[in-house]
């Protein structure tokens, strides 16, 4: 990954208070297909420990069955090696926005 453009590098933190998916999609929906740096808990790989990953954003999910309607960032681990077949996409990830930090590079 190339060095971040410092003039556009910023971080967003998310509280655990029932995020509104419509707001998230409106504010962060433009990230689909872009690579961001995420500090949070990967529900698919390591649901206990905080991980730091560069992620190619796919979108956001908000399951109806959860009592507090949490919002999840979905995507793939960014793989730095050029891989024409997979668009630099590694393992699938699903990270709750609550208590996560996203840095847009």
Image (cartoon, rainbow, N blue to C red):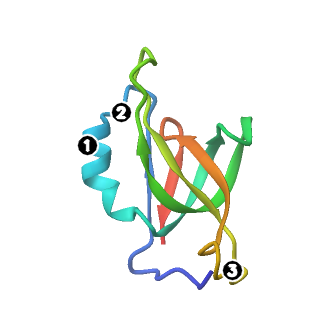
> In terms of secondary structure, where does tag 2 sit?
loop
Around disc 3, counting alpha carbons within 10 Å, would you say few (fewer than 14), some (14 to 19), or many (20 or more)?
A: few
Q: Residue at x 28, y 54 (%)?
A: 27
Residue 16 is left or right of residue 46, and the answer is: left
Crowd around label 2: few <14 · some 14–19 · many ≥20 (10 Å): some
Position in image of residue 38 (x %, y %): 57, 55
Residue 83 is tagged as 3
- N-terminal of the two: label 3 or label 1? 1
Residue 86 screen position, x and y as percent = 63, 72
Q: Decide which of 47, 63 is in the foreground and name it.
A: 63
Q: Is residue 10 above or below residue 68?
A: below
Residue 79 in picture, x, y percent from top left: 69, 71
Q: Residue at x 53, y 80 (%)?
A: 4
**Mark closer to the observer (3, 2):** 3
User: Label 3 to label 2, Cα distance in Å?
Assistant: 35 Å
Q: Earlier in the sequence, mark 3 or mark 2?
A: 2
Number of numbered markers: 3
């Amino acid at each position: 990954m190339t060095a971040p453009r410092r003039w556009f590098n910023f971080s967003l933190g998310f509280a655990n208070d029932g995020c509104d998916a419509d707001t998230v999609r409106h504010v962060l929906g433009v990230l689909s297909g872009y690579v961001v740096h995420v500090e949070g808990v990967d529900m698919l790989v390591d649901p206990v420990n905080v991980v730091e990953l560069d992620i190619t954003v796919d979108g956001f999910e908000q399951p109806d069955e959860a009592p507090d309607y949490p919002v999840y960032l979905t995507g793939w681990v960014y793989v730095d090696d050029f891989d024409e077949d997979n668009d630099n996409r590694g393992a699938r990830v699903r990270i709750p926005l609550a208590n996560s930090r996203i840095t847009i590079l």
